[in-house]
Amino acid sequence: MKTFANIDLTQDHAAKMFVKNETVYVTFAVQDGELLSREGINRFRASDALIASESGERWCVSRDRFDLKYELVVANQFRAKHIPVLARQMQEPFTISRRAGGDVLEGAALDWLLQYAPGDYGIVENARFLRVYRALVAS
């Protein structure tokens, strides 16, 4: 299994820009804890966003990042803002830390490695990626 650290997808010709098109269900943690996603353990702090997709995937986002990435639709439903993200489909199993010293995530072959910002990463399973992400077309 390949392990990545501090990868920079801006320098990778196989990486492309995508935007997320999804509405999710959100609660905010009342205490520190962890949840298990398909990609691994996600540790969270009180007030972080605990997110569930319509198809049942779960993950967490720190409150400061959540407020930048999602907008309220109604009650506990939030829509992802159309913020470009770099993504590359991986051809072999791999691991990467969400951020320096953060949770280690595991991806399978054909999953997508996402870079939200320098040092800020995620992994999305291929079928989910194809459902929720759209290529950003240059104008």
Image (cartoon, rainbow, N blue to C red):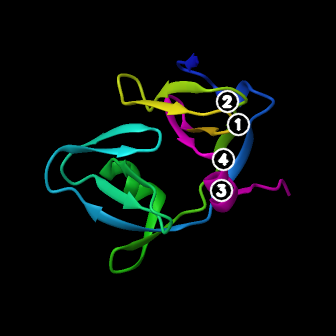
| Lateral position of residue 45 relative to residue 111, left or right | left
Residue at mark 1: 88
Q: Nearer the viewer, mark 1 or mark 3?
A: 1
Q: Nearer the viewer, mark 4 or mark 2?
A: 4
Outermost residue toward the left? 31
Tell me which numbered mark, 2 or 3, is placed earlier along the sequence: 2
Horizontal and vertical percent for residue 3? 55, 17
Horizontal and vertical percent for residue 114? 60, 39
Q: Which mark is residue 19?
A: 3
Horizontal and vertical percent for residue 71? 44, 69
Q: Is residue 24 above or below residue 69?
A: below
Under circle 2, the secondary element is helix
Under circle 4, the secondary element is helix
Instruction: Please say whether residue 135 is one of the residues in the magenta stretch.
Output: yes
Q: Which mark is residue 9?
A: 2
Are there few (<14), some (14-19), or many (20+) residues within 10 Å of tag 3?
some
Residue type at mark 1: give it. Arg
Which residues fall within the magenta stretch? 116-139
Between the C-alphas of marks 1 and 3, the distance is 13 Å
Tell me which numbered mark, 1 or 3, is placed earlier along the sequence: 3
Residue at mark 4: 126
